[in-house]
Image (spheres, helix red, strand yellow):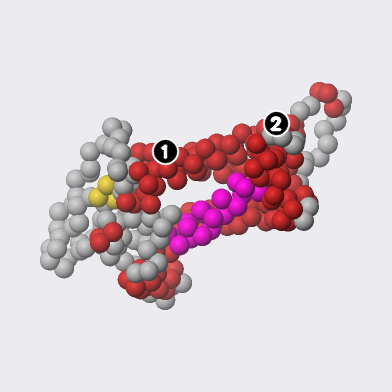
Amino acid sequence: MVIATDFDPPPPTAPKPNGNGNGNGFQPAIYVYEFPVRIWHFVNAFAIAALLVSGYFIGSPPPTLSGEASDHFLMGYIRFTHFAAGYILIIGMAARTYWAFVGNKHALEIFAPPILKAKFWDDTWHEFKRYTFLEKEGRKYVCHNPIAVLTMHFMFLWGITFMIFTGLALYGEGTGMGTWQHTLFTSWIIPIFGNSQNLHTFHHLAAWSILIFVMIHVYGAVRDELLGHQSIFSTIVSGYRTFKSPGKPEDMDRA
């Protein structure tokens, strides 16, 4: 079941063939990212930014402020920002998971990469060589290229899931026994890691992995916008993928 939304603009006009293509002309613009996915992308980005900055200061607190302690609430505000952004992230991921199953087929891609298809791995190898400057030309894709799909599935999706579970387990220590956070998460996650300090350490390390993912994600998006065969930034704003060169995208069978 696909739920339609009324917030999406009409598709942009696809460019006309310039005569130097392979006979197929330019692929018309394709609707890829639905409105809920695009909203989630930006809300999620702001939540992650707030979590990374506030989390850093929780792990490495700023110097003590002068004056009476009752006059300051700096760490309180930092912790509140972290907890509030955490709940925004959790609600957003729950909504995004729901939309993966009720939205269009592109919404499910990062949740279920087509790893059983030989063509997917052929494209993955090609894109790996392009990112490592062993291949000059990239291939054209309707949705994400295979490297992006795998990176978002393993580094982002599983990384965020780990952060949510461990974050709620740590939060449950403060809310105390009997609360849903402690019952559903703290009670069994902390024993797995041995103690609270170990859990803090792994939560902290996973946060750095999310930061590394963000850098890879931004680099890949900028590089593909400048050197790739399809739009990137305008697509996450409008939802429509447009193409800069003639020919059929590699993943049209999944489009």
Predominant SS along the magenta part: helix
Q: Quadrant of residue 20?
A: bottom left
Q: Earlier in the sequence, mark 2 or mark 1?
A: 1
Picture layout, residue 146 above or below residue 206: below
What residue sits 77% from the left and 42% below the top?
Answer: 61
Q: What number is the disc on residue 39?
A: 1
Query: For the residue marked with disc 1, what is the amino acid?
Result: Ile
Which residue carries the number 2 mark? 77
The answer to whether residue 168 is seen in the rendering is: no
Report the front residue among 25 and 51: 51
Residue 10 placement, left or right of 127: left
Residue in view at x 74 percent, y 40 percent = 173
Kindly state the secondary structure of the residue where label 2 is placed.
Answer: helix
Q: Is residue 236 above or below residue 5?
A: below
Residue type at tag 2: Tyr
Question: What is the x, y in percent for residue 148?
Answer: 43, 60
- 126 left or right of 84? left
Q: Position of residue 72 (x, y in %)?
A: 79, 27
Which portion, as a residue range, is magenta?
148-168
